[in-house]
Amino acid sequence: MTTRQIYDLAVKLAIKNDLRGVPAVQKYLARTKKKYQNLPAKDKAIFDQEKLTNPYSDSRILADHKKKQIKKIMAGIDMEGPELLLAKQLGDIDLVITHHPQGEALVDLSDVMSLQAQVLADYGVPINIAESVIKPRLSEVSRTLSPLNYDRWLDMAKMLGLDFICTHTTADNLSAAFIVKLLKAEAKGLDTVGDVLELLNAIPEYTVAAKKKNGLMIFSGEADDSCGKIVVTEFTGGTNGSKDMYEKMAQYGIGTIIGMHMSEEHRTEAKKYHINVIIASHAASDSLGMNLFLDEIEKQGIAVVPMSGLIRVKRFKK
Ligand SMILES: [Fe+2]
């Protein structure tokens, strides 16, 4: 496989596992295409063409030296300067994959957050409400990221001759879908927050994280509390959504949310509206999505070296 083929596979798997469903993603891409076609020539010239086929703005090819065959990959949660130097020093790494975005994928992270509104709509919050609550947060994230030196590490990858890609929402979609599927399969046995916690704790990545004292945590509610309607939000779609969403979630019948991380400000709001919150270890949750993607690459005979906090668990037999 080439770097382009590996990246294309990441996008394909993400679309297939997108919580919005494939038809909704196709509609989103069709809308993007229409917007592009209606742009004036000067705006068309700077338009990111990847958006026409990849709906995830935070997952991009950052450096591609057009190598004929990728044989060995180094993959991790945050692959930056030290990891790139290590990859070069090992001598046989063709491609470095970072989960968290860099370069234009980091600057444009907010664009993927619209996914969260549609996911909430699918859980019962009217789309007009979900969208209008999340919109100010999108521009807030965009402003926060704008001053960053976002090309720092990809300049280094280019100079070192390493191919470099980031797979953020493309991987997070896989972990979110994995957990949604598990919750559906075990729905009958899930009465309390503690039941949900127990179910998630059996996922190997979370078991490893728990041993490292970074297991799942209840941020709001108690283990004995009834979980009510469980939703997997703040798991995919860029970063934390709007803190104003919890009021709407409560109004539309959501009882427990499962997320990867949550600020104290968000937690206070969730508690205020009696929403139970389970926060699944960030590193382990990121690892779960990356593992489901990396399994598909390893099946093609490409070696994977885990790095930078990636808890590598394989779900296939060679
Ligand atoms: Fe993450």
Image (cartoon, rainbow, N blue to C red):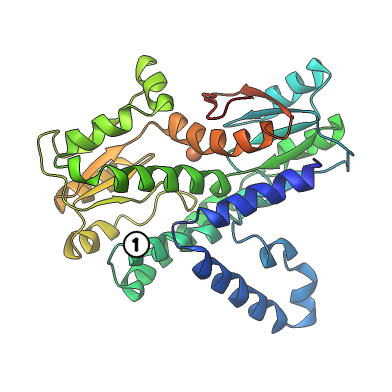
The image quarter in which residue 253 lies? bottom left
- Name the residue that disc number 1 marks: 120
Image coordinates for residue 222, horizontal then vertical, percent: 13, 35
Quarter residue 108 falls in: bottom right
Quarter of the figure with residue 50: bottom right
Residue in the picture at 55% in, 71% down:
28
Residue 232 at what x, y percent from top left?
Answer: 34, 49
Question: From where the camera sits, is residue 275 visible?
Answer: yes
The C terminus lies in quadrant:
top right
Secondary element under disc 1, as helix, strand or loop, is helix
Q: Say left or right for 44 vs 314.
A: right
Mark 1 Cα shell of 10 Å, populated few (<14), some (14-19), many (≥20): many
Q: Return the x and y of residue 165 as percentages of the image width and height.
A: 71, 41
Q: Quadrant of the N terminus?
A: top right
Against 168, is 73 above or below?
A: above
Left/right of residue 240 with respect to residue 123 in the rendered view:
right
Q: Provide residue 193's location: percent of width, then percent of height.
A: 18, 38
| Three-letter code for the amino acid on which mark 1 is drawn | Leu
Identify the residue shown where x is 18% and y is 49%. 275
Task: Classify residue 266 as left or right of residue 162.
Answer: left
**Does 297 sit above or below residue 188?**
above
